[in-house]
Amino acid sequence: MRRDALGLIVSMMHRHGGLVRLDLGPRPVYLVTHPDLVQEVLQQKHRSVSKKTFGMAQLSLVVGSGLLTSDGELWRRQRRIAQPAFHSQRLAGFAATMVKVAEETADRWAGPAASGGEIDVSREMMTATLQVVSTTLLGSDLSRAASEVADAIDFLLVEIRRRINSPWLPPLAVPTPANRRFQKMRATLDRLLGATIAARRRGEERGQDLLQMLVDAVDDETGERMNDEQLRDEVVTMFIAGHETTASALAWTFYLLSLHPGARERVWAELDRVLDGRRPALADLNALPFLGQVLDESMRLYPPAWIIARQTAEPMQVGSFDLPEDRTILLAPFAIHRSPEFWPNPLAFDPDRFAPDRVSAHHRFQYLPFGAATRMCIGKGFALIEAKLMLATILSRYRLDLVPDRAVALEAAVTLRPRDGIHMRVVRRGAA
């Protein structure tokens, strides 16, 4: 599992079907790779599972009890309060920021394009999506604080990955050098966000950003607002969920379009017809269906959330198998997205799989880039708008070609990312 988690879960699907027990340590885990069983776990029997897995326990050291890690009534309450901030009308106000960041990214590439230089598109997308989430979450007036918050979160996530992969590490209470660094950086994060939240509470600052929406939001059922700790946890959760996942999806999309120039030509033809040289806007996205299909197919082959973990809260049956209480279930989008039972020629890049007439025939749980059922990612709409606008802006101006002899390797970390980046040459469209 450590050496090749992705290869293992796919081979288990092919060899053993939709549910297989894996003895990876003192207690077994159960790998689910069939849409029927995913539906059973996430929808039909969702009350029999929780998110109290080992990985989530480690992640909660950073995000606290945000929407990503919480369960039960706390999760339902937080979801009710946060949901209005992600309504389509609210998201429309962020589209201009997304396009602006994409244009600044494209402007920054003018130098490499003129000199024949190369970029790491993975790192570039990390930078761009960080700028988007920083501005839309904390506002442009807090750019310095947002940058420091992001640095702290990035450091803490690296440590979380290390802890997940090395579960024998001592508890945080043990004052090892690594634990002291972790505690210090988490304290820095809490101080920065605490000061920002306090200023909003006092009315010293008001913004047109997600944080202000969350500060102002009221639970329709109870009339309550989020307290400072809950605000802090949701801000950190949104930083993580709105940063690395979208960056990975964008990087893999540029990678796949470089490998499939025919699909790239179709994207260009669509962009030229709809935009005719102007900047894209939110209203254009419905007129760019093939661009959306390319993104969907990219996230099928390289889903940022490559594994979804749940813990059995009571003895339960999945399929024809009995699972004990307190066992980990691993739902594997990466494997399901490669199942020949549901995806003909599954390793091929074929955006037409997501043409409307073909999507209507899909199993509801065979495509899971944002999870499914009640725990569907609250930021799905935000992420899709951001990714499509950034793709439209950049692809209107540039051709990105993979640098020969620079291998691209998968890393199954918290998200599915390129281990050593994706190195590409930037060429202005129309240039030789």
Image: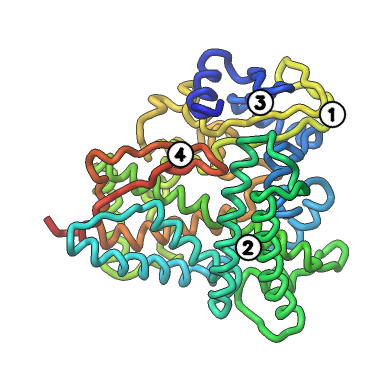
Visual colour scheme: rainbow
Which callout, 3 or 4, points to the residue nearer the camera?
Answer: 4
Q: CA distance from mark 4 to mark 2?
A: 27 Å
Q: Check if mark 3's residue and mark 4's residue have beta carbons within 8 Å.
A: no
Determine which quarter of the picture holds residue 301.
top left
How crowded pointer 3 is (Cα within 10 Å; few <14, some 14-19, many 20+) is rated as some
Say which residue appears at 47% left-offset and 28% top-offset: 338
Q: Quick one: SS at disc 3?
A: helix
**Which numbered disc covers residue 37?**
3
- Quarter in which the C terminus is drawn: bottom left
**Residue placed under numbered mark 1 in the picture:** 314
Q: Earlier in the sequence, mark 2 or mark 3?
A: 3
**Residue placed under numbered mark 2 in the picture:** 87
User: Which amino acid type corresponds to the residue marked 4 in the rendered image?
Assistant: Tyr
Say which residue appears at 77% left-offset and 34% top-offset: 49
Q: Position of residue 296 (x, y in %)?
A: 45, 44
**Which numbered disc covers residue 180?**
none
Q: Earlier in the sequence, mark 1 or mark 3?
A: 3
Q: Earlier in the sequence, mark 1 or mark 4?
A: 4
**Residue placed under numbered mark 4 in the picture:** 302
User: Which amino acid type corresponds to the residue marked 3 in the rendered image?
Assistant: Leu
Q: Residue furthest top?
A: 15
Q: CA distance from mark 1 to mark 4?
A: 32 Å
Q: Quick one: SS at disc 1?
A: loop
Which callout, 2 or 3, points to the residue nearer the camera?
Answer: 3
